[in-house]
Amino acid sequence: MIGARLAASGCTTAALARGRTLDALRTHGWRLRTAGGVIGGPVTASDDPSALGPQDVVLLTVKAHALPALAPTLAPLLGPRTTVVPAINGVPWWFFDGAGGEFDGLRLRAVDPDGTVAAAIPTARVVGCVVHLSASVEEPGLARHHAGDSLILGEPAGGTSGRLEALAAVVGEAGFNVTVSTRIQQDIWYKLWGNMTMNPISALTGATADRILDDELVNGFVRAVMGEAAAIGERIGCPIAQSAEDRNQVTRRLGAFRTSMLQDAEAGRPLELDAMVTVVREIAQATGTPTPHMDALLGLTRLNARVRGLYPRDLDSAPTPHDPRQRCRAGRGCRRSGATASGGPRPRSHPPEREPFLSRPP
């Protein structure tokens, strides 16, 4: 979605893709179906980062569990001043880098087990991104926009910068509602607080968001987990100024909403459990915050994913043709990642596994 909007606004874009998506991008360029029709524009697409060369901005739009294998392959895209924008669900590897406070520099093994991502993408390159929109893939190379168009951008160390303002301007010109945050970790935690329960519970039960919230017992469990996550947020300087009940009313208004994790489970794709729940429990342990309800949620969902062959770490140790990290090791970008060639920075769309990662010029 983001690639199509950027191209339509006149940005020069490039995409790192593979398979049928690569073929479609080469044939048709970017395509996005909106309420007003199909928009898009040209793109230079390749499955070889070296063929694209250094970018002004690289947007990472893969699933979080694909990043450790993908990150080391990105070197050809990174010039001296390249900005990297991870538009990925959950808590990112850089979350505590330069943020100050008691937990400054805390390494998060749940999302970067051996430090591969941090080594390949130094935090100094990163502009944080929180995505608030819904889109899906109709077919390879063709996305459909469902709702929302908000992106929050921020420097990991806080404050603002010239590159942040320039990136926000470019993204705004492409039609997104852009907010520049001076505390991006707070925005990441708030979004996580709202979806770290609905996503795994939907994958575990097969229920849409409305059915989860309409069940009195499950609703109570959701609020208990959210309470634990809010307590962790207080310890790390990311307080939540809203009640769980009020937040869930926002979710309820979405109706029979199918979360991204439910869609992945139904399609037999690996689940983003570690970036949404395992990492939160890891932070809880570092802060000494008890999380009995969160532990139950993680244990049940992880076991369910393992039984169904959908837990990424199990796939890493027993590679299958569906393992995106093995595809990356084969010398290609993961199934949907991308980079925009030339110019300024660009972010990307909600289902982070549905597009190639992109970058673009100012």
Image: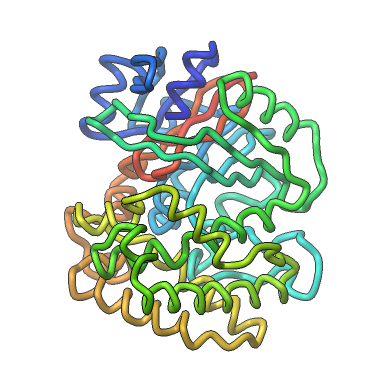
Judge left or right: residue 215 versus residue 280: left
Residue 78 screen position, x and y as percent: 57, 36
From the viewer's perspective, is residue 246 above or below residue 24?
A: below
* Residue at (39% x, 44% y) in the render: 351
From the viewer's perspective, is residue 213 above or below residue 286?
A: above
Q: Quadrant of the N terminus?
A: top left
Snapshot quadrant of residue 108: bottom right
Residue 182 screen position, x and y as percent: 78, 47
Observer-nearest of 293 and 330: 293
* Residue at (58% x, 88% y) in the render: 290
From the viewer's perspective, is residue 275 above or below residue 236?
A: above
Q: Quadrant of the C terminus?
A: top right
Judge left or right: residue 128 versus residue 297: right
From the viewer's perspective, is residue 22 above or below residue 83?
A: above
* Residue at (40% x, 54% y) in the render: 69
Q: How many marks?
A: 0
Q: How is the image coloured?
A: rainbow
Residue 114 screen position, x and y as percent: 50, 69
* Residue at (45% x, 26% y) in the render: 3
Observer-nearest of 195 and 60: 195
Snapshot quadrant of residue 146: top left
Observer-nearest of 188 and 59: 188
Residue 282 screen position, x and y as percent: 54, 78
